[in-house]
Amino acid sequence: MATNMVLLPCHALRITPPGAAAFASSPLSARPRPVFASSLGGRCSACRTPPPAAAAAAGGGRDAAASWDGDLGRAVPWKAAVSSALAVALSFTCFVGIVNAKTGVNKPELLPKEFTTVIDVAGFLSPGQENRLRQEIEDLEKDTGYKLRVLAQNYPDTPGLAIKDFWQVDDQTIVFVADPTFGNIINFNVGALVDLDIPRSFWSRVSGKYGNMFFWKEKGEDASIEAAVMAVSRCLREPTGANNCSEVL
């Protein structure tokens, strides 16, 4: 099954250092979507059209600029119609760009031998806490169909892109990366179907409430992770509507 992943701001999936994020509108949605700079320095995009000034210089004044306008107009519906397979390829191209912004991170050797929904390579959680989170995630998936996955790490000690295949990340997956390296410990990457149901402001509110440095330094990384998982679980169980997930409890 082809998938689309919605890449939230760089602080929202911090498998690598921040600094590459830039906001733009995605061709795959009518709502604004953040787009990231790749390791090559350009923004991830399905299509790139030269600016009008460059087109005018190359093609001669107003005619070239008009041609650029026409090309841009044709590009938008083409982007909107891009297939799911191409979309997921582009999404993970952006993802690769983020992960490789400083140094490539893809360490499958850090993955557990058996499948689990909680991977704690940083040692933030006790065995009892891991078991409670796994049970909560299992019940949530059974009740709602949403797939929450938790990765606790200290960059650069992370499986990185290896988690995509390990967890079979798809449109109904929320990847929660807990990493205190750069300040806020809570970071999310959400699937396209989740993005349709859950307001984007919810993720930033969870991150702001439970992921800020004051919270996790006082209460511990484990407390931040558990509080965020429970907040996400409560939100995903709410009926979809205009006011769903309006509170972070």
Image (cartoon, rainbow, N blue to C red):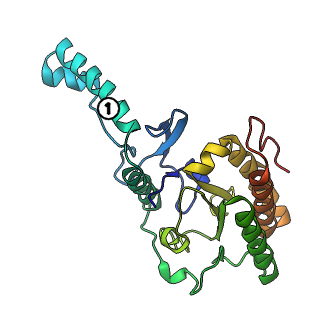
Q: Against 27, is 127 above or below?
A: below
- Name the spot of residue 127 as percent of width and height, x first: 77, 83
Residue at 77 percent across and 42 percent down: it is 244
Q: Against 29, is 229 above or below?
A: below
Helix, strand or loop under label 1? helix
Residue that protrudes farthest toward the bottom in the picture: 113
The one of 196 and 131 positioned closer to us in this rendering:
196
Does residue 225 appear anywhere in the picture?
yes
Residue at 73 percent across and 43 percent down: it is 240
The one of 218 and 35 positioned closer to us in this rendering:
35
Residue at 14 percent across and 25 percent down: it is 58
Residue at 55 percent across and 71 percent down: it is 167
Q: Against 104, is 110 above or below?
A: below
- Name the spot of residue 168 as percent of width and height, x first: 52, 69
Residue 153 falls in which quadrant of the image? bottom right
Residue that label 1 marks: 75
Q: Residues within 10 Å of mark 1 (few under 14, many from 20)?
A: some
- Name the spot of residue 131 as percent of width and height, x first: 77, 79
**Hey, what amino acid is under mark 1?**
Ala
Position of residue 199 in the picture relative to residue 92 (left or right): right
The image shows a total of numbered marks equal to: 1
Position of residue 66 in the picture relative to residue 122 (left or right): left
The one of 89 and 49 positioned closer to us in this rendering:
89
- Name the spot of residue 12 as percent of width and height, x first: 61, 52
Does residue 178 appear anywhere in the picture?
no
